[in-house]
């Protein structure tokens, strides 16, 4: 883990705590590689732990939203924010989870052209609105989601995923985080 994955010269903490090394080994074992976002955060174990905890809670934790729905939200937010790293990484996740390379590409380029059911479209339209103008979100926006079967907990989870990726998009873009090359060939 010596090559830079961002434009900043921030080598990994030395030594990395054993729990961090185990986590990175688990990622490598499960995914076949260590995502560069984890490598980028490894310079500061406190920041690494906070990022991993929030990511795991929002993207892998208990939710009424499916993993695919959460990844689709991540892609919509990242596309609006023009975050190269997250478009590539989460676009690959959408392709993999959906089994549909076309959907993954449409989500990255313009989710509005994707063949989506009305419930998913409402969720992604809401995610886009929160990304672009969260202060303008009102009760009518939340009620529209409820009309598509989303619970208040689901709505909170949508907003939390949008907020997390709005933050990480800005970090990844501003430090020129480089996506792992393997993402480009996944699930094609």
Image (cartoon, rainbow, N blue to C red):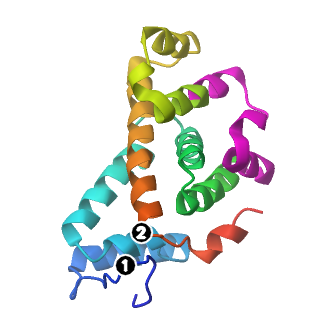
Please report the bounds of the magenta region as a residue range.
99-123
Separation (CA) of disc 1 from disc 2: 6 Å
Crowding at label 2, few (<14), some or many (≥20) Cα neighbours within 10 Å?
A: few
- Tell me the SS state at disc 2: loop
Of residues 57 and 76, the one drawn nearer to the viewer in this rendering: 76
Q: Are marks 1 and 2 in contact (CB under 8 Å)?
A: yes
Q: Is residue 91 left or right of residue 160?
A: right
Q: Nearer the viewer, residue 19 or 104?
A: 104
Up the image or down, 172 lies above or below 169; here it is below
Q: Earlier in the sequence, mark 1 or mark 2?
A: 1
Magenta region, main secondary structure? helix
Quadrant of residue 27 within the rendered picture: bottom left
Q: Which residue is mark 1?
A: 8
Judge left or right: residue 183 versus residue 57. Answer: right
Q: Residue at x 33, y 59 (%)?
A: 52
Q: Is residue 22 left or right of residue 117?
A: left
**Image quadrant containing the N terminus:** bottom left
On the image, which quarter does residue 139 sit in? top left
**Residue found at x 41% / y 69%:** 175
Quarter of the image with the C terminus in it:
bottom right
Residue topped by disc 2: 175
In front here: 32 or 180?
180
Q: Is residue 118 magenta?
A: yes
- Relative to 35, is 120 above or below? above
């Amino acid at each position: 883990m010596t090559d830079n994955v961002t434009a900043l010269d921030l080598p990994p903490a030395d030594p990395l705590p054993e729990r961090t090394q185990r986590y990175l080994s688990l990622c490598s074992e499960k995914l076949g590689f260590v995502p560069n976002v984890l490598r980028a955060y490894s310079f500061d174990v406190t920041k690494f732990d906070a990022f991993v905890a929030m990511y795991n809670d929002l993207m892998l934790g208990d939710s009424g939203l499916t993993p695919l729905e959460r990844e689709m939200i991540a892609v919509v937010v990242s596309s609006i924010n023009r975050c190269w790293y997250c478009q590539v990484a989460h676009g690959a996740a959408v392709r993999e989870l959906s089994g549909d390379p076309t959907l993954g590409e449409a989500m990255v380029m313009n989710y509005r052209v994707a063949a989506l059911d009305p419930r998913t479209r409402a969720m992604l339209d809401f995610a886009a609105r929160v990304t672009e103008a969260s202060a303008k979100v009102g009760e009518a926006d939340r009620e529209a989601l409820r009309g598509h079967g989303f619970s208040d907990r689901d709505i909170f989870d949508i907003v939390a995923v949008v907020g997390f990726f709005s933050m990480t998009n800005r970090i990844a873009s501003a430090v020129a985080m480089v996506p792992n090359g393997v993402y480009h060939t996944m699930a094609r």
